[in-house]
Image (tube, rainbow, N blue to C red):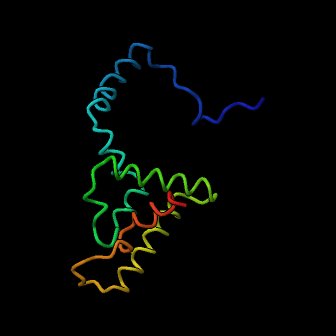
Amino acid sequence: MEPLPPALLCDHTCSDTDVVANCIPSLRLLAGEDWLIFFERISQVEQILRQDPIGVYAHMDFDTRDRYRKVVERVARATNQDEIVVAQAAIALAKIAHDANGISTLAHSPTQHVGYYLLAVLAC
């Protein structure tokens, strides 16, 4: 067996006590993080769905947004597509409807909301 490259060799100069002592501040930092906010901040699907042309998605509560994200996940799995592709397709359809109705329309059509396309999948 070939020896590991120097970059992959473990440095055994730290004691177990030092390792644990270094981990405790990191664990405290992680424990204080609001995971729901953190997740939505880093989720690419979330960022795409927030491009909802009529802005409804961004104002929904977490549970409803999570329901939409789970639909994206299910569609992606069922169609062997990436979740990002599914979310982008739903946004693209909503934008087409929005552009067709005119941006200054006071009463938005349901077809201008990303949820129309995601929830229609559940009805099929």
Q: Where is 13 relative to 79, above or below?
A: above
> Could you say where residue 67 lies in the image, as x and y percent from the top left?
40, 50
View extreme (left): residue: 106
Please report the residue visible at 48 percent of the width from the left and 54 percent of the height from the top: 71
Locate residue 110, reporting x and y percent: 35, 71
> Which residue is at the front of the view, 29 or 44?
44
- Residue 113 picture quarter: bottom left
From the viewer's perspective, tell me whether residue 4 is left or right of residue 75: right
- Relative to 98, is 49 above or below? above
Q: Report x, y in % for residue 40.
A: 34, 50
Q: Could you say which is closer to the camera, residue 68 or residue 4?
A: 68
Measuring 35% from the left and 53% from the top, which residue is drawn there? 65
* Picture quarter with the N terminus: top right
In the displayed structure image, the side of residue 8 where residue 97 appears, left or right: left
Against 77, is 51 above or below? below
Residue in the image at 39% along x and 18% along y: 20
**Residue drawn at (32%, 42%), measured in percent from left and top?**
36
Front in this rendered view, residue 26 or 107: 107
The quadrant of the rendering that contains the C terminus is bottom right
Q: Is residue 112 left or right of residue 72?
A: left
